[in-house]
Image: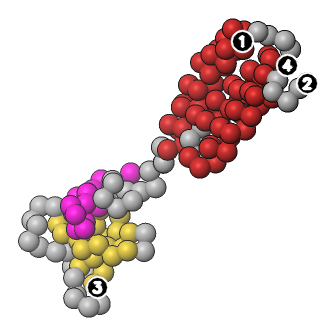
Amino acid sequence: MDLLSPALLWLLIALISLVFELFTGAYVLLAISLAAALTAAGAWLGLNLIGQLAVLAISCGILVPLAIHRLKHRQQKPDFGVAGAGGGAGQRFVVMRRDYDDAACIKLDGDLYRAVLDADVDTAPEPGDEVVLVRFEGNQAIVKPASQQPTP
């Protein structure tokens, strides 16, 4: 194996794409580096340039869509119930008063949200009332009395 053999050149291409993969975090360059490594194996087995390019094209055609599929699933985060994204809707809460402004609030995931009745936006529930969260509008929790909610 001489210094500029095709197998070593393909391995060098695979190594360079792996280094760039470290900077991007996308799996596409990882797939290309695996395809280049497979092409290096084909070159080591004695394939001519057309055969090497065919191995590269076929392996990229298989590995790159798999990498893109993996990348899509990695970026989809599960809904952890963040306020405003529908988290906590339908849950029961007990209304409490906030210390600094005496606002009627519910506590969701350690945060206090001002509670406003769904039917009448100008009125707030009283402290100690049991309410059901309907939705969020901005940073206000729109609630309705728990007596209106059927119990399961």
Tell me which residue sits at (74%, 20%) in the image.
39
Residue placed under numbered mark 4 in the picture = 44
Tell me which residue sits at (11%, 61%) in the image.
119
Answer with mark 2 or mark 4, whichever residue precedes in sequence: 2
Answer with mark 1 or mark 4, whichever residue precedes in sequence: 4
Specify the segment rendered in magenta: 133-152
**Left or right, 57 with reference to 44:** left
Comparing 58 with 81, the one in front is: 58
| Label 1 crowd bin: few (<14), some (14–19), many (20+), radius 10 Å | few
Please, what secondary structure does the residue beneath circle 1 have? helix
Q: Is residue 141 magenta?
A: yes
Residue placed under numbered mark 2 in the picture = 1
**Distance Cα–Cα, label 1 vs label 4:** 12 Å
Residue placed under numbered mark 3 in the picture = 98
Answer with mark 1 or mark 2, whichever residue precedes in sequence: 2
**Distance Cα–Cα, label 4 vs label 3:** 73 Å
Residue placed under numbered mark 1 in the picture = 49
**Left or right, 90 with reference to 102:** right
Mark 1 and mark 4 in contact? Answer it, CB < 8 Å.
no
* Coordinates of residue 114 in the picture (x, y in percent): 24, 74
**Distance Cα–Cα, label 1 vs label 2:** 17 Å
Mark 2 or mark 4, whichever is nearer to me = 2
